[in-house]
Amino acid sequence: MSSTRLPTLRRMQRAIAAMACTVLLCGGAQATGLTVLMADETAAHVEFVRQLRETQDAGSLFNLVHLAAGEPVGEDFAAASRPAGITMAVGMAAARSAIERPGQDPLVLAMLSRLDYESLKGTAALRRPERQIGVLLREPAMADQLALIDALLPAKRRLGVVATVESEPVVSELQRAGQGWDLQVEYAPDAKSLAAALRLLVPRSDALLVLPDKIGDSQAATLAVLRAGAGAGLPVFGSSEGLVRSGGLAAAVSTPSQLAQQARALGRKLAAANGTASVLVEAATPATVRVNTTVARGLGLRLPDERDLTARVTGVR
């Protein structure tokens, strides 16, 4: 057997074992049973699933199925997993696979970015849902990011944002939440060409915000924004812990543990829903604040600790 076939074989073996587990146990499973689909084992996804497993109710089924990225879920799995009660797809690849299969069980699409969700909105499964579907975004709402910036820089209102055309849904959410802010938005051709937009943006801004878009997902693009902010003495905010570690001042984030708790609650909400099938979208909540104290000292800022800031941000909501 060639080595190139081994990973696929292992995935098939894991899926078969998971299906066997379902068939053996589903007779005694309760409605709170959970089937989890995972296609890519990033650190965040693995931690998210670990939290789900550890908080599963005693006596109810927990069924983890590993999929090859982009692999549709077959009819045999759909039939076997249906008694589990709730299906949860972790990440974009698993979400695409999950919505392609028929089923009446409530479905949670978890750990998606806002732009992931926007790319799925046009699919038939979400435009004309045949079951209750929940979408859990992995980032806190833009209102939480603005609450954090307001807590740290209460006298500043000029917030600079560099975006691309694909960022428009996130920019629109920011604009809706940003009443009373002087939002300065400059568009770059793509995430690799930010220099011109940043030159226009920096002189008109009191702080910069990196959106959870292609710029925020690119280490090189994020570093370009951080360097522009550092060169002008401007604090940079965002929605990832990586940005804070790399030189951002602060970020409102949601941890895999928090997201797992929210995903489970969303699943129960869907299972209890009556009436017409629909799609329910939730931003990550609560947010947890992360601060780079070294950057704060360099900017001459005396900040509350992360716990106090987290309470302040969640209190605004």
Image (spheres, grey):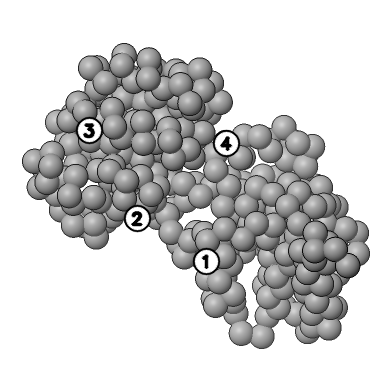
Q: Which residue is mark 2?
A: 288
Q: Residue 194: name its quadrant.
A: top left
Q: State the image coordinates of residue 132 (x, y, percent, origin top left).
A: 71, 52
Please tell me how crowded label 1 is: few (under 14), some (14-19), or many (20+) other residues with Cα within 10 Å. some
Q: Nearer the viewer, residue 305 or 68?
A: 68
Please tell me how crowded label 3 is: few (under 14), some (14-19), or many (20+) other residues with Cα within 10 Å. some
- Against 299, residue 183 (above or below) is above
Q: Residue 310: name its quadrant.
A: bottom left
The residue mark sitting in front, 4 or 3, is: 3
The residue mark sitting in front, 2 or 1, is: 1
Query: Which mark, residue 220?
Result: none
Please tell me how crowded label 4 is: few (under 14), some (14-19), or many (20+) other residues with Cα within 10 Å. some
Q: State the image coordinates of residue 314 (x, y, percent, origin top left).
A: 32, 52
Quote the CA–CA distance across marks 3 and 2: 24 Å
Q: Residue 90: name its quadrant.
A: bottom right
Quote the CA–CA distance across marks 1 and 4: 22 Å
- Against 236, residue 27 (above or below) is below
Q: Which residue is mark 3?
A: 230
Q: Is residue 178 left or right of residue 308?
A: right
Residues at circles 1 and 3 in contact by the CB criterion of under 8 Å = no
Three-letter residue code for mark 1: Glu
Q: Which residue is mark 4?
A: 115
Which secondary structure, mark 4?
Answer: helix
The residue located at (82%, 52%) in the rendering is 72
Query: Which mark, residue 47?
Result: 1
Q: Which quadrant would the N terminus be assigned to in this image? A: bottom right
Three-letter residue code for mark 3: Ala
Quote the CA–CA distance across marks 1 and 3: 33 Å
Q: Nearer the viewer, residue 245 or 169?
A: 245
Quote the CA–CA distance across marks 4 and 3: 28 Å
